Amino acid sequence: MTLGVGLGVEGNGELEPFGEVVDARERARLLDRGLVQLNAFWAGEFQPPPRQQPRIPVWVAARWPYRRLVRRAARWDGLFPTDLPGPDALAELASELRGLRAGRDEPFELVAEVAPGAAADPWEAAGATWLLTDFGSQPRRDEVREVIEAGPQ
């Protein structure tokens, strides 16, 4: 299992109807506090502890080109940047993350979304450890099946 976290989408009205905090800075504080609490639960305050050790991996979503979420992700296990203009942007993030994570040996995942049929090589060279196929908000069944039948690159 991998836990994906983020601040949610700004300005689309997805949070307000439920009485959720709308301010991005306050949501960021709540996310950081919640992750610390969750980590404490996973470290033994919750029984039974998760089977994955030292804990369930946490991947942080961040919208390109914003950097605060990149710094947050560096404290955890992975970064899932959205709206990347291309592999060069991912390489820039990978370089930044190497600096932020200097001296840490734990694995770190860097995720990229690619269009169906896009070549994986440029993204791997940029530092991607995972590639997810982005079918858009209205996936076409035949396109999805084609990607599944082709299998991993």
Image (cartoon, helix red, strand yellow):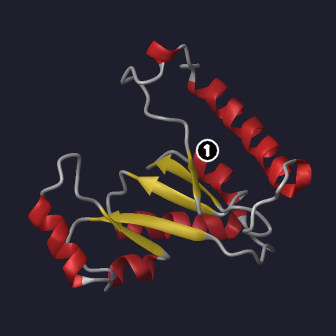
- Identify which residue is drawn at 89% across, 55% down: 44
Q: Nearer the viewer, residue 72 or 43?
A: 43
Give the crowd class for mark 1: few <14, some 14-19, many >=20 residues within 10 Å.
Answer: few
- Identify which residue is drawn at 9% across, 66% down: 142
Q: State the residue lying farthest toward the left.
A: 142
Quarter the C terminus occupies? bottom left
Left or right: where 142 falls relative to 45: left
* Image location (x, y in percent) of residue 124: 42, 81
Q: Is residue 63 above or below residue 141?
A: above
Q: Could you tell me if residue 122 is visible in this image?
A: yes
* Image location (x, y in percent) of residue 79: 55, 59
Q: State the residue lying farthest toward the front.
A: 48
Q: Is residue 110 above or below residue 45?
A: below
Number of dots carrying numbers: 1
Q: Could you tell me if residue 117 is visible in this image?
A: no
Query: What is the three-letter code of the residue carrying label 1?
Result: Arg
- Identify which residue is drawn at 34% across, 84% down: 121
Quarter the N terminus occupies? bottom right
- Identify which residue is drawn at 82% across, 56% down: 48
* Image location (x, y in percent) of residue 61: 52, 50
Q: Nearer the viewer, residue 92 or 83?
A: 83
Left or right: where 24 falls relative to 39: left
* Image location (x, y in percent) of residue 65: 45, 48
Secondary structure beneath dot 1 equals: helix
Give the residue pinned by disc 1: 68
Q: State the residue lying farthest toward the right.
A: 45
Left or right: where 96 falls relative to 125: right
Q: Is residue 99 above or below residue 74?
A: below
